[in-house]
Amino acid sequence: MASIEFNNVIKRYGIGPKANQVIHGVNAGVQDGEFVVIVGPSGCGKSTLLRMVAGLEEISDGTISIGNRVVNNLEPAERDIAMVFQNYALYPHMTVFDNMAYGLKIKKVPVDEIKARVDKAAGILELGALLQRKPRELSGGQRQRVAMGRAIVRQPQVFLFDEPLSNLDAKLRAHTRLEIEKLHRELGITSLFVTHDQVEAMTLAQRMMVMNAGRMEQFGTPEEVYHRP
Ligand code: ADP
Ligand code: ADP
């Protein structure tokens, strides 16, 4: 687990006079083990903010720290994060087990350890009976669980969720939301979760960062955000 600090974070796309500033100085501190939802309308900068934490987008100005370590100049693989994407991004030719194990194999984690980690993740996500299937033999919800399993086995300090529920139908969305809540209860890993859906945000968040046009307008518990005078 780790805290995350945003210190006057600025993002510009492009350079020189044509540069477009899309994040205008975000300051916020996420506590160890906290589940924070970044919410706001399409185009307000949620995904950009998350991708800067992940190292998938350069930070134009200011700093982001994970566990008291400034990560601005660290590669994604050095940041101790795992990301769950909207479109799952599973390898179609690999089994569920191999999809979850792949990153660990590359890192040369011992085979026994890989098996133990995959089995544990499969237990939490109820994927035990599906480990030998290929992604095409899974439902959308099952695929999303495999994507989460792949993040869990990395044993990261931080989970980053980029609209992971938005491709699911209403019933599955509710179910998967419960899975994510359970995951956070059991593992207690610091999490940033991006969504444009206010109900989803309110349901999942311990605290929510409300973004609008590249600025963080509010940062508080759902009660604080919705009952503000
Ligand atoms: P959100 O996730 O809230 O929908 P984004 O972070 O995707 O918002 O986008 C914020 C702003 O940055 C938008 O105006 C978008 O058009 C712009 N933007 C996002 N990605 C790029 C990019 N790669 N190049 C230029 N502009 C971008
Ligand atoms: P390593 O992380 O040790 O470089 P991996 O094979 O696990 O090796 O990852 C390869 C690349 O893909 C790295 O940049 C890693 O950060 C990234 N990656 C793999 N899975 C995820 C994930 N779930 N979330 C974020 N990044 C990931």
Image (cartoon, helix red, strand yellow):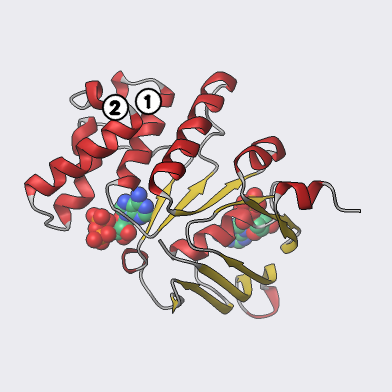
Three-letter code, disc 2: Leu
Secondary structure beneath dot 2 equals: loop
Three-letter code, disc 1: Gln
Q: Say above or below: 63 vs 206.
A: below
- Where does label 1 land, which residue? 142
Quadrant of the frame with the N terminus: bottom left
Q: Say above or below: 27 vs 134.
A: below
- Where does label 2 land, which residue? 127
At horizontal 54% and vertical 58% (from top left) the residue drawn is 50
Q: Say above or below: 36 vs 89.
A: below
Q: In this view, does 224 lie to the left or right of 182?
A: right
Q: In this view, does 11 lie to the left or right of 110?
A: right
Report x, y in % for residue 173: 54, 27
Q: Do the residues labelled 1 and 2 touch (CB within 8 Å)?
A: yes
Image quadrant in which you'd find residue 137: top left
At horizontal 24% and vertical 31% (from top left) the residue drawn is 96
Q: In which quarter of the image is ligand 1?
A: bottom right
Q: Which of marks 1 and 2 is nearer the N terminus?
A: 2
Observer-nearest of 60 and 172: 172
Secondary structure beneath dot 1 equals: helix
Q: Say above or below: 139 vs 190.
A: above
